Amino acid sequence: MTSGSSPRHQGRADVPEVVVARLPQYVRILSRLRENNAEVVSSHQLGERLQVTPAQIRKDLSYFGRFGKQGRGYDVVHLLDRLKEILGLNDQWNVAVVGVGRLGKAILSYPGFTPDGFRLVAAFDGDPAVVGQDVAGLIVQPMDKLDEIVQREAISIAIVAVPVDRTQHVIDRLMQCGVQAILNYAPIAPQVLPGVRIRNIDPVLSLQSMTYYLGGEGEI
Amino acid sequence: MTSGSSPRHQGRADVPEVVVARLPQYVRILSRLRENNAEVVSSHQLGERLQVTPAQIRKDLSYFGRFGKQGRGYDVVHLLDRLKEILGLNDQWNVAVVGVGRLGKAILSYPGFTPDGFRLVAAFDGDPAVVGQDVAGLIVQPMDKLDEIVQREAISIAIVAVPVDRTQHVIDRLMQCGVQAILNYAPIAPQVLPGVRIRNIDPVLSLQSMTYYLGGEGEI
């Protein structure tokens, strides 16, 4: 796939990225509701958990079809199954981790990826002292094996945990190998080619978006 | 402060949360431009880096005053200083880390918080085997010291890296102690009291928001 749309939702009107970004949260909330044997959920209940208005919930979901039943709410199992399908969460996604320092090791050891269909299948590092190490069951590979392994393992997603000054270079190489989605942990906003998706995990930006709301003492 | 607004921006019209969430990215981009001795930047340039339209940039910034000069763009130093002030980034913020497992240790060892004004001043864990350990220069404290230390160190922000099934309980305790902002690493969306801010760091949700755009094979 080189275009931005998948067969799962071909022909559907463009969905705002902010709506797509909320869908995984719907999936998580609905999964929990199903575990608790809830059969229906209202836009009001979903809105409370997602911290948006019920109207926004109805608008979000209207992009993908008619799910709600007047006065009854949404069928938990049906909505969950449909959203998982739309997001491609019934597929298995092979993921590479690039950068096996302290953070990369924590990522490789994190058990939360696999149950959600993300298989960490390869780890790479540029440091010869790290290459060859066994981390969480994977042997760390050298960067010059990137192309070969990405093809062989059908890797479409990479998690990048390398130092800031190496990040853009590593991401450029990943894109050359055909990786289409990148989760970046360095505190920069790398440039990507059209059609490539990137998300940045950045705790400092998250903290800074909260201090706005806190009382401070340094103001003029 | 118990209200949601700070003296730094009292009386200002309500700014959408999505705009506030973008401000730290402006700060980061402007900081880099200043390091490179750029004096002005256009809404077009800012839009490219933030991946929003130039019109959105102008709208974002219009909430906070008149920054742009017709046909000239924004003064980098002035805009940067003003946004840092609005976000409270000239203040120092004392932060507690709760949960000192593998992830908590990586957080405590991360050097990126301090340059941006976030001082990690205390670490807590519920496991007696972890309490008393020295991690990155901090002695891990027991949970029953939480209230005392939060008060003494004037901690307003907590980073929570405890297991899912402990997260809501820990966050409830932090709020009782007066903590106003929480960065949560557990893969749930905890409930918080009105006026308390929370951000969730969740790599699986980020991955799931990208698979929407990728070609899959499991679709009907």
Image (cartoon, coloured by chain):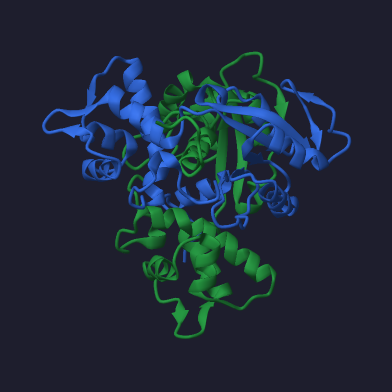
Chain colours: A green, B blue
- Residue drawn 59% across and 22% down? B111
Is the residue A136 above or below the residue B210 in the image?
above
| Residue A211 visible in the shown view | yes
Q: Residue at x 61, y 58 (%)?
A: B191
Residue at the image position 23 percent from the left and 41 percent from the top:
B58
Q: Quadrant of the C terminus of chain A?
A: top left
Compared with A83, A183 (above or below) is above
Q: In this view of the protein, which residue sits in the foreground, B147 or B200?
A: B147
Q: Quadrant of residue B76?
A: top left
Residue A180 seen in this snapshot: no
Q: Nearer the viewer, residue B187 or A108?
A: B187
- Residue A15 placed where, x, y %? 34, 59
Q: Is residue B77 left or right of residue A159?
A: left
Q: Residue farthest to the left?
A: B71
Q: Position of residue A214 (x, y in %)?
A: 51, 42
Report x, y in % for residue B153. 68, 31
How many numbered markers are drawn? 0
- Give whichever of B170, A125 is nearer the camera: B170
Which residue appears farthest toward the bottom when viewing the image? A71
Left or right: A123 as drawn, with respect to A84: right
Q: Nearer the viewer, residue B48 or B26?
A: B26
**Residue B34: x %, y % from top left:** 33, 19
